Image (cartoon, rainbow, N blue to C red):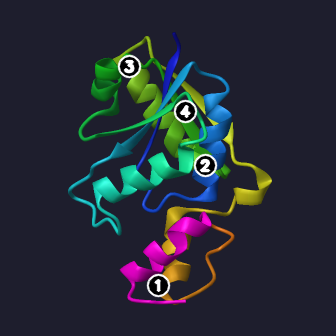
Amino acid sequence: MKVGIYPGSFDPVTFGHLDIIERSAKIVDELVVGVLNNSAKNSLFSLEERVSMIKEMTAHIPNVKVGCFEGLLVDYMKKINATIIIRGLRAVTDFEYELQIAQANGVQNPEIETVFLTSSLNYSYLSSTIVKEFASYGGDISKFVPEQFIDRIYAKYNITR
């Protein structure tokens, strides 16, 4: 069985993330969306909130599971028997960074393969940072995130719509 992982902070999860998840789920038997718990980072949403939102957003995809981890991705991959890392690329600048990480992971475990999926054109500009920037000023984020998350995001900035 091919187990893949799509790791990230997903703070917050966006339509771009969902696009990569749906496409990745078609190329592996099981896809784990691995939510990184980085205590050094000030996240907008707690780890539990991010996991919950991803579960809610991916409930329609039967071979997707959501997990969380801290530390090295390669260590978590051993724990869940994953051998494929899925990464989304929006631009050339993403590729340089992601290539270095993929090569380092391959040195740590030669059994690991990294698969790069380019963003759909509809989401090539989109990042969690952009969502947070727009939301912090009360901007329209309806084209960035699923409807059921909009009020939760605004609430983090004490904004109501």
Tell me how far mark 1 sits from mark 4, CA to CA: 30 Å
**Residue 134, horizontal then vertical, whole percent:** 56, 81
Q: Are the two marked residues, 3 and 1, in contact with CB atoms closer than 8 angstroms?
A: no
Verify whether residue 7 appears in magenta.
no
Please name the residue that numbered disc 1 is placed on.
Answer: 136
Tag 1: amino acid: Ser
Instruction: Quote the CA–CA distance across marks 1 and 2.
Output: 22 Å
Q: Is residue 80 left or right of residue 27?
A: left
Residue 6: which numbered mark, if any? none
Whole-percent x and y of residue 159?
45, 89
Mark before the other along the chain sequence, 4 or 3: 4
Label 2 residue SS: helix
- Give the alpha-carbon distance from disc 4 to disc 3, as whole Å: 17 Å
Q: Give the side of residue 26 with respect to residue 99, left or right.
A: right
Residue identified by numbered label 2: 18
Distance from disc 4 to disc 2, alpha carbons, whole Å, reads 13 Å
For the C terminus, which image quadrant?
bottom right
Task: Give the residues in magenta.
Answer: 145-161
Q: Earlier in the sequence, mark 4 or mark 2?
A: 2
- Marks 4/3 in contact by CB < 8 Å: the verdict is no
- Viewer-side residue, 89 vs 62: 62
